[in-house]
Structure formats: structure tokens, C-alpha cells
Amino acid sequence: TNQAFSSGDEMDFQPMQDISKLIPFFLEKGVELINLSMFDAPSQTRIYNTLGDEYIRRGRLRDATISFERSNNNAKLTEIGNEYEKMLMFENAIEVYVKSNARDRLRIIGDKCTEELKIGGAIRAFTHLGDMDKLNALGQVCMERQKWDAALEIFSSIGNRAKLIELGNQCCTYPFYEYAGRAFELAGDFVALNKLADECLKQGFVQKAKRIYAAAKNEMMVNFIASNYEK
């Protein structure tokens, strides 16, 4: 073994023959802790691929993912994503598909997450794909199911001002004034914010009205509340 690492005897160095003996050590130490800087790039790639295959055999998919990510083995990463998907671990599958840029798989699992209302996974998949149509459709589903936080996240991330205003108006009818205020603020609709704050004040939600007036940059009404309601 000493001969294998001797810098003065490179002619006798048989990379994979000697490195293969170290695989059990690498497995025990853990892929996140090993240092392969003394090996050339092809040898590092082979080591990580060997470790990844062994981790899969042992059911250690997280370590296998790290190994194949380090060896830039997108095909193997996609296989791991498939395994996670079979186990219905969609979030894990999506993370691995993102690493391997498995766009076809991301479209499929994004649609599946939408159908099953696994909103976080769908957002992650469609955002990576840059699929505005799918994200808008997902945001609409969230609005219909009253999943306001997710709808706000989606429409604000893609800059859909019209949908943010529609969401705000919808929240006003329930009424979910906090969500309405956030939607109008994200849309930059100061007129709607002031109307909402007026309604909150009318309903007796003074502090809520003050926060919304502040978001609308209506200093006069903020000062009015401070002078007439907070003393």
C-alpha cells in the first residue's frame, strides 16, 4: 500500500488495482468526509461511481446521491430520483432530478405533485423548468383550494401582478385581510391597499388597518391612527 502512494515510484502505481482496496475504508469513513485530492480526476470519478453503486446496493440513497453528484453522473442521479419516486418521496426525487437536470422527469413529477396537492414539490419542479404556464396553473389551483401562502409565493415569484390583484380581491371576500394586504402589496397596488385599510378600520381592526396603510405609504392615515386610537 505504501508503494501505491509513493510519489517517487509512479511507474509502479496501478491506480484502480490499488484504489479498489480502499473502497471499504471510504465506505466506512463516509463520502462527505473522504479527501481524494491526491488522485487524478479520472480516478476520483471512478472511485465516486464505485462508492455510489455500493451505497445504492446498501440502500443509502443520500450518500449515493452525493457520490454521483461528485462524479457528475447524471444518469445514475436520475436512477436515484426514480427510486425515491417509487417510494413516494417526491421532494427527495425532485431534488435529485434538479441535480441531474432530468427535465422530462421533473415535468412528470411536477404534474403528479399538482394532482396530489403536494404544492411545494410542484413549485420546485416547475420553477427549475422555468415553466410559467404550469406555475400559473398551479397558482390557480392554490387559489381555488384557498392555499393562499402557496399562491402568493407562486404569483410573486413569476411577477404575475394581475393574479396577485385577483388573489387579493378574492381574499377580501372571505375575508382574509392579511393575505389580501400581502397580495396587494406584492402587486404594488396602493389604491387597493388603501381601500382595504379603510375597510379594516371600519370593521374595527385598527392595528391591521395601520399596517396596511403603512404598506400603502399613507403616512397621513398612519399618523391619524397613532393620534386618535393609540393614546
Image (cartoon, rainbow, N blue to C red):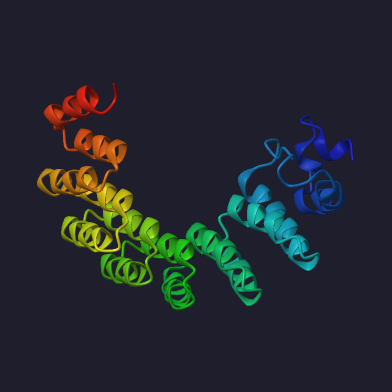
**Count of numbered labels shown in the rendering:** 0
Work out whether residue 72 or residue 133 is closer to the camera in this orientation and state it: 133
Work out whether residue 222 or residue 126 is closer to the camera in this orientation and state it: 222
Work out whether residue 201 or residue 9 is closer to the camera in this orientation and state it: 201
- Tell me what residue is drawn at x 18 percent, y 24 percent: 223
Work out which quarter of the rendered image holds the C terminus and state it. Answer: top left
Q: Residue furthest right?
A: 1
* Up/down of 199 relative to 170, above or below: above
- Percent from the top left, x then y, of residue 193? 17, 45
- Percent from the top left, x then y, of residue 180? 26, 53
- Tell me what residue is drawn at x 78 percent, y 62 percent: 54
Work out whether residue 164 or residue 195 is closer to the camera in this orientation and state it: 195
Work out which quarter of the rendered image holds the N terminus and state it. Answer: top right
* Up/down of 195 relative to 96, above or below: above
The image quadrant of residue 73 is: bottom right
- Percent from the top left, x then y, of residue 210? 25, 35
Left or right of 88: which side holds 26? right
- Percent from the top left, x then y, of residue 106? 45, 69
